[in-house]
Image: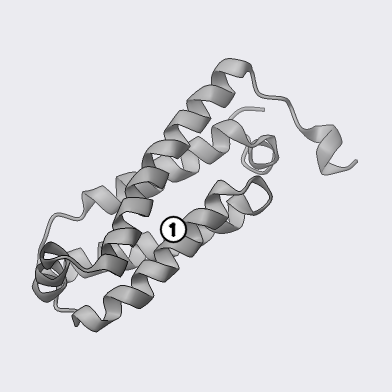
Amino acid sequence: MTLETQTVPASKKMLWIGRILSTLPVLMLLMSGVMKLVKPTEVVEGFAKLGWPDSLALGLGIVELVCTVLYVIPRTSVLGAILLTGYLGGATATHVRIGDPFIAPIILGVVIWLGLFLRDARLRVLIPLRS
């Protein structure tokens, strides 16, 4: 049996909730990535507070934007979610290391996966919440 024959189509309501939940982190990540490329004073100060040289902002911004774009494209959305999970794991570790609150990147990661779960039937087949 192929994956396509096992999928259960999402209701329109589930699909739209998934799209909305996916849009929120995408907007936040796009803004964050662009800010790292532009490097306003707040970003430079934030990197200094986190103990990272601001020269890393460009590379991290590019990685963040590429992972976000992969998440937005339906064919590569699972890969994008996996890469964003790793990226957000690094953000969580950085905040833990300096004693900052670290719940925001964890919540962002959960919303990324929840949005994808609701809008992608392939993922619901791989992770069934009920039998």
Residue 21 screen position, x and y as percent: 43, 33
Residue 123 screen position, x and y as percent: 64, 42
Is 16 situated above or below 98? above
View extreme (right): residue: 1
Q: Is residue 110 visible?
A: no
Q: Residue at x 43, y 69 (%)?
A: 63
Q: Amino acid at mark 1?
A: Thr
- Image quarter of residue 39: bottom left
Q: Element under label 1?
A: helix
Q: Residue at x 44, y 61 (%)?
A: 65
Residue wearing tag 1: 85
* Quadrant location of the N terminus in the rendered image: top right
Is 79 situated above or below 98? above
- Tally of marks: 1
* Quadrant location of the C terminus in the rendered image: top right
Residue closer to the observer: 10 or 99: 10
Residue 16 screen position, x and y as percent: 53, 23
In the picture provided, is 97 more to the left or to the right than 118?
left
- Image quarter of residue 88: bottom left
Is 69 situated above or below 50? above
In the picture provided, is 109 more to the left or to the right than 12?
left
Residue 67 screen position, x and y as percent: 49, 61
Q: Residue at x 19, y 82 (%)?
A: 53
Residue closer to the observer: 68 or 84: 68
- Image quarter of residue 33: bottom left
Q: Residue at x 47, y 55 (%)?
A: 68
In the picture provided, is 120 more to the left or to the right than 62?
right
Q: Is residue 106 visible?
A: yes
